[in-house]
């Protein structure tokens, strides 16, 4: 049966967390910002109240620990509480607060876990401020991040400077490594898409997370007077970009890819000046490693060909590339059984969004469960998951932890 007290607590905490960094109708908590650090300290206090030891590590991750009956690799549950700009209140936050809710349920029910239970809120999953996605989970996994410290935000502030301003020493980053003490990783998340809602399913079991390819393309022509430069003699960088973006879209439609151009900058940016340079982002996603390889080559070829048609030069720089990651089959089965025990309809699906699980899942067995998103909307103030589905996710998560921790 549903636990009204737990449900009320989870809902109240989602609202309380959303108030930290409230931005219009949405929420903005970017990496190392005062808003995110305030939210992290708030979470530490909630975890301590729930009987855990908790801290903010050198990478800005919140890590809470409940002891088990024996010294063994921990079951780690986690997600993130950073957001995109004017994002929603559930993305990432439900996974963290649902994990805390699950820990409360287990302890209130008298569960004596054999393995330690850890909860993590990983810093900078979104990469919104510095384009350093999954910074916290990569630090936790012990991946080298020295090159990331010089990345700068739009105001010119580097990661290293932002860390220092938040009271963290960049030289202490290796101290965030903790994955060597973890045996498995579970992540609850809103789906951020329409599949579960359309199917009438309450729980999604993720079979794999798509690979992510990010490129930054710059086309250069010649800025010139808009009134005196004949159309057939122009080297218009924006015209070349428009041609390339549409060609990339057609390629994606024909090859089963998800490709997005979400950022574009034009220079010099005058209404009466032919654009001399144009830079845009390219985001490509697929669960097929071979298709990701082919996609990168195709983007470069298409951009080069379209630039040549407009008399432009082209440069495509890789920003990031993360290979697809399969989730652990045995852990998927545990989630299946836990969801079915709750009477939930279960659907298997591939995650089209990146998650911290794709970092940790390269090192330890990992699994994800989704709950429906109303209208499939995410990264938007209208993002919403019903209280009943939030609670269902927390109950299934608790049941899965109970199996994995014993």
Image (cartoon, rainbow, N blue to C red):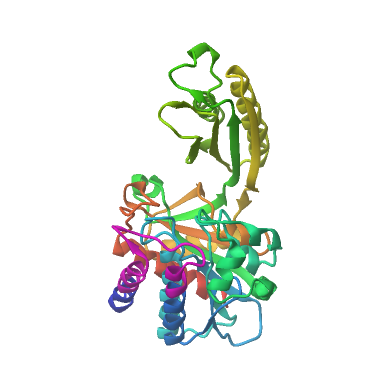
Q: Which residues are magenta?
A: 11-38
Residue at the image point whose x is 59% and y is 88% from the top: 69
Q: Which quarter of the rendered picture does the C terminus lie within? A: bottom right
Residue at the image point whose x is 56% and y is 53% from the top: 131
Tell me, yes or no, whether the highlighted magenta stretch contains residue 36. yes
Q: Position of residue 366 (x, y in %)?
A: 59, 62
The answer to whether one can see residue 361 in this image is no
- In this picture, residue 91 sits left or right of residue 115: left
Q: Position of residue 256 (x, y in %)?
A: 54, 32
Q: Quadrant of residue 163?
A: bottom right
Query: Where 249 sits versus 61, above or below?
Result: above
Query: Where 1 sits versus 373, above or below?
Result: below
Badge count: 0
Q: Position of residue 255 (x, y in %)?
A: 57, 29
Instruction: Give the camera-side residue of 387 and 222.
Output: 222
Instruction: Give the camera-side residue of 5 and 333.
Output: 5
Query: Where 276 sits versus 378, above or below?
Result: above
Residue at the image point whose x is 46% and y is 34% from the top: 269
Q: Which quarter of the rendered picture does the N terminus lie within? A: bottom left
Instruction: Give the camera-side residue of 241 and 2.
Output: 241
């Amino acid at each position: 049966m549903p636990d009204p007290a737990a449900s009320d607590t989870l809902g109240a905490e989602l609202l309380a967390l959303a108030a930290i960094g409230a931005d219009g109708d949405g929420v903005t908590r970017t990496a190392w910002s005062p808003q995110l650090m305030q939210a992290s300290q708030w979470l530490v206090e909630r975890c301590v109240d729930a009987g855990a030891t908790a801290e903010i590590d050198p990478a800005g991750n919140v890590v809470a620990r409940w002891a088990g009956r024996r010294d063994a690799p921990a079951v780690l549950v986690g997600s993130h509480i950073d957001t995109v700009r004017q994002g929603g209140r559930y993305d990432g936050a439900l996974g963290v607060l649902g994990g805390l809710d699950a820990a409360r349920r287990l302890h209130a029910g008298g569960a004596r876990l054999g393995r330690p239970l850890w909860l993590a809120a990983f810093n900078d999953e979104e990469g919104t401020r510095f384009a350093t996605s999954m910074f916290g989970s990569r630090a936790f996994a012990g991946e080298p991040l020295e090159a990331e410290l010089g990345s700068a935000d739009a105001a010119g502030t580097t990661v290293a400077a932002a860390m220092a301003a938040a009271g963290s020493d960049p030289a202490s980053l290796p101290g965030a490594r903790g994955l060597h003490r973890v045996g498995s990783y579970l992540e609850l998340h809103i789906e951020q898409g329409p599949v579960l809602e359309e199917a009438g399913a309450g729980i999604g079991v993720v079979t794999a997370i798509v690979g992510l390819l990010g490129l930054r393309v710059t086309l250069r022509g010649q800025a010139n007077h808009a009134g005196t430069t004949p159309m057939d003699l122009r080297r218009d960088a924006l015209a070349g970009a428009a041609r390339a973006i549409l060609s990339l879209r057609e390629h994606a439609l024909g090859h089963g890819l998800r490709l997005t151009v979400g950022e574009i900058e034009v220079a010099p940016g005058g209404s009466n000046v032919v654009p001399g340079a144009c830079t845009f982002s390219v985001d490509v996603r697929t669960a097929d490693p071979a298709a990701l390889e082919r996609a990168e080559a195709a983007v470069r070829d298409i951009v080069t060909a379209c630039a040549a048609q407009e008399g432009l030069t082209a440069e495509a720089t890789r920003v990031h590339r993360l290979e697809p990651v399969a989730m652990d089959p045995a852990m998927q089965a545990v989630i299946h059984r836990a969801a079915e025990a709750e009477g939930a309809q279960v659907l298997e699906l591939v995650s089209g969004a990146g998650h911290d699980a794709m970092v940790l899942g390269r090192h330890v067995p990992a699994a994800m469960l989704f709950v429906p998103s109303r209208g499939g909307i995410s990264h938007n103030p209208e993002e919403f998951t019903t209280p009943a589905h939030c609670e269902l996710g927390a109950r299934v998560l608790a049941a899965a932890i109970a199996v994995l921790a014993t």
